[in-house]
Image (spheres, rainbow, N blue to C red):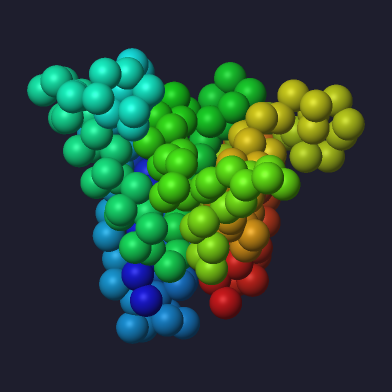
Amino acid sequence: MKLLHVDAGILGSYSASRQLTAEVVAQWLKGHPDTTVEYLDVAANPISHFGADAIAVKGIAQPEPNAAQRAENALSEQLVSQFLAADVIVIGAPFYNFSIPTQLKAWIDRLAQPGRTFKYVETGPVGLATGKTVIVASTRGGAYATSEGGQAMEHQESYLKVVFGFFGVTDVRIVRAEGLAMGDAPKAAAMSAARAEMAAATV
């Protein structure tokens, strides 16, 4: 079994999402000791954003790609191949400005490749990256899950569920710690709640 560990928090050792992904991976390895782990840090090593050169080589622009387009395609192929080779993907997804970090979005944009992670048929899109488990370590400074207004402002977990579902991943598990910026007691309670969810998410 292969596990891909992806961190996106920009706060380094102060990042709650990094703390939780490390604990999720450790917990997973306890129950699945035959798992091999590959690590990707999209904050420390940012992926270039998806642009014209990245999409050109897919046949949308000229048929003969230039050097920049070949380099962008090689990066996309490296990242999508790494994703497709993994059975389990553990993602640290902090809540930035009502959504996910731009670095994490750049990674996901490289995964969204027709013929690799999805395809279109007469009835609509079909996900091709089936049979995987995605575990999201979701961290938030405020509380958004417990009210209708908060849920309307949340484009983090909801987005990740939609995009991985589009890729064919139906097993998306959330380990959530929210209210982390609301004081020491709420932060401690949030991390405790996340660790309780972790046990079920890593079975």
Instruction: Report the side of 114 relative to 47 (left or right).
Output: right
Q: Give the residue furthest to the left.
A: 67
Residue at 35% in and 70% down: 2
Instruction: Report the side of 182 relative to 66 (left or right).
Output: right
Q: Does residue 63 sit above or below 118 in this rendering?
A: above
Residue at 18% in and 24% down: 64
Q: Quadrant of residue 185?
A: top right
Q: Could one spot residue 188 in this view of the protein?
A: no
Locate the C terminus and report the quarter of the image it occupies. bottom right
Q: How many marks?
A: 0
- Seen from the viewer's position, the closer of residues 162 and 30 is 162
- Seen from the viewer's position, the closer of residues 100 and 127 is 127
Q: Quadrant of residue 86?
A: bottom left
Residue at 57% in and 53% down: 127
Question: Residue 118: x and y, percent?
Answer: 52, 47
Q: Does residue 96 sit above or below 28 in this rendering?
A: above
Locate the N terminus and report the quarter of the image it occupies. bottom left
- Seen from the viewer's position, the closer of residues 161 and 147 is 161
Residue at 61% in and 51% down: 126
Instruction: Report the side of 127 relative to 68 (left or right).
Output: right
Question: Residue 164: x and y, percent?
Answer: 57, 48
Q: Does residue 153 sit above or below 94 in this rendering?
A: above
